[in-house]
Image (tube, rainbow, N blue to C red):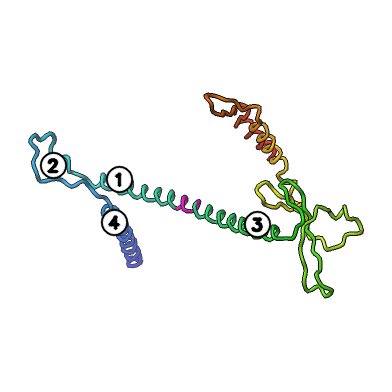
Amino acid sequence: MTETLSEKKRSHVKEKMSNYNTQLQKNLELKKRVELVESTSSKLAVQLVSQKKATKCNHEHLMDLAKTISTADSHVKATTTNRLKQIADQIKRLQQEATHILESAKRDKMLHQAACNIVKKPGQMYYLYEKDLDDKGEFTQAYFSIMSPEDWGTRMPHRYLGGYRLGYDMQFTEEKDIGKDQDTWDIIHNIYEKVTDVQQFAMEDGKVSVALDAFNVGDFSMAITDKM
């Protein structure tokens, strides 16, 4: 019984010493990270303070410095990784946007190459059809018309592929997507017509000046926000 208690005591002391050594090793590692200002061997003309006291640094002070450095490192790491994550998310969004832009450009290029006997004007609707050029249907031609399927009724001569509106940027918008931003475009068009009204032009010192008082950025932002 006495030997058992003695063994338990020795085991407890051994464990306590092991924990103490581990903590001591951690403290030493922290101390190694503290970089103090090096003292100079050159003497000053006037010794204002005691060099011995100024360079003296006890254990507690070193530990506080080490903990401050460790905390600062963790904060820097957290801040840096968060910013890198934001940049990574932005890159992904830009990649997706670039893909969408290229796909839209490819589609618009194909639509502009479709046959058309009229001059296409921005703001107008055009309807895409496809007709066979031979009896077997091996060769076809896509063409634009101002006639909608409703205009043809039951006499629609060729396959209907879709309706598109030509924008002022010469890009096409599919008929099903036209209504999504129509309110916003109406606001923009109204502002454009109002601000570029020729009646607001005036001559000052022989030069044309434009009065932009009619345009208010705050009103524009509020109008756009209300439509979102």
Residue placed under numbered mark 2 in the picture = 52
CB within 8 Å, label 3 to label 1: no
Q: Residues within 10 Å of mark 2 (few under 14, many from 20)?
A: few
Tell me the number on the disc at residue 29: 4
Tell me the number on the disc at residue 104: 3
Q: Nearer the viewer, mark 3 or mark 2?
A: 3
User: Between disc 3 and disc 2, whose residue precedes?
Assistant: 2
Q: CA distance from mark 1 to mark 2?
A: 21 Å
Q: CA distance from mark 2 to mark 4?
A: 25 Å
Q: Which residues are magenta?
A: 81-86
Q: What residue do we see at 53% from left, 54% from top?
A: 89
The quarter in which the C terminus is drawn is: top right
Q: What residue do we see at 58% from left, 56% from top?
A: 98
Counting from the top left corner in percent of width and height, residue 7 is at 33, 66
Q: Residues within 10 Å of mark 4 (few under 14, many from 20)?
A: few
CB within 8 Å, label 4 to label 3: no
Tell me the number on the disc at residue 64: 1
Counting from the top left corner in percent of width and height, residue 142 is at 76, 63
The residue most toward the front is: 206
Task: Say which element carries label 4.
Answer: helix
Task: Say which element carries label 1.
Answer: helix
